[in-house]
Image: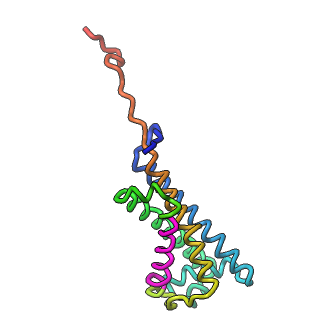
Amino acid sequence: MITTKVPGRSAAGYRLRYLVLGGLAAGTLDLVYICSLWAAMGVGPLRILHSIAAGWMGREAAIAGGTATAALGLASHYAIAIAMAGAYGLASRRWPRLLQHPLRYGALYGVALYLAMNFIVVPLSAAGSGPPRWEWMQVSHLLAHMLLVGIPCAFAARFAARTVPAPAAAAPIGSFGESDA
């Protein structure tokens, strides 16, 4: 494995930094995709964020909450995306092959995330909708999770695994004014 030495920071800190950045990238790409898709149908970004917050409090309460619940939706979206990147990073420590083929395994991870979110998380949330019907839009969402969420998570884990801090330089003997005699 190729490593990059980074002075002054711990390995865990740099790994975490890359995984957080990967989660932020995946979350942003996903939001741009979904907001662009729904904007073409006349739905604004605030309503998208309300839909995310509906998982906590139900659809009517999320919409009635205005910008506060939209902020909750935004924070929730990014927290979930960061957790997704972190989970891939943890899995890659057990199965290093995940790091060797980020396109393949990242896309498969995107499929797993899509299925988990749509068939487990959302139906069990306060939003309470059932599993999605398979239409063209669901295929589009699945592809978006593969390309815009799973693959960025995989590359974040790959970068995180390759970043190792430089060892602290040891002071030479006698460098603090002490004599050797």
Q: Residue at x 42, y 65 (%)?
A: 87
- 36, above or below 166, in the image: below
Q: Residue at x 48, y 58 (%)?
A: 101
From the image, which quarter does the C terminus lie in?
top left
Q: Residue at x 60, y 80 (%)?
A: 139
Instruction: Answer left or right for 43 relative to 125.
Output: right
- Total numbered labels: 0
Inspect the magenta stretch and tell me whether residue 115 lies in it: yes
Q: Residue furthest left?
A: 181
Q: Give whichever of 153, 8 is nearer the camera.
A: 153
Our reading of the magenta stretch's main secondary structure is helix
Q: Residue at x 31, y 19 (%)?
A: 173
- 88, above or below 176, in the image: below
Query: Is the image coloured rainbow, by chain, by secondary structure, or in one colour?
Result: rainbow
Q: Give whichever of 1, 116 is nearer the camera.
A: 1
Instruction: Answer left or right for 110 relative to 176.
Output: right
Place of residue 83 in the rendered image (x, y in percent of width and height, measured from the top left): 45, 66
Residue segment shown in magenta = 106-122
- 93, above or below 84, in the image: above
Place of residue 15 in the rendered image (x, y in percent of width and height, measured from the top left): 44, 51
Place of residue 119 in the rendered image (x, y in percent of width and height, measured from the top left): 46, 84
Instruction: Answer left or right for 94 relative to 65.
Output: left
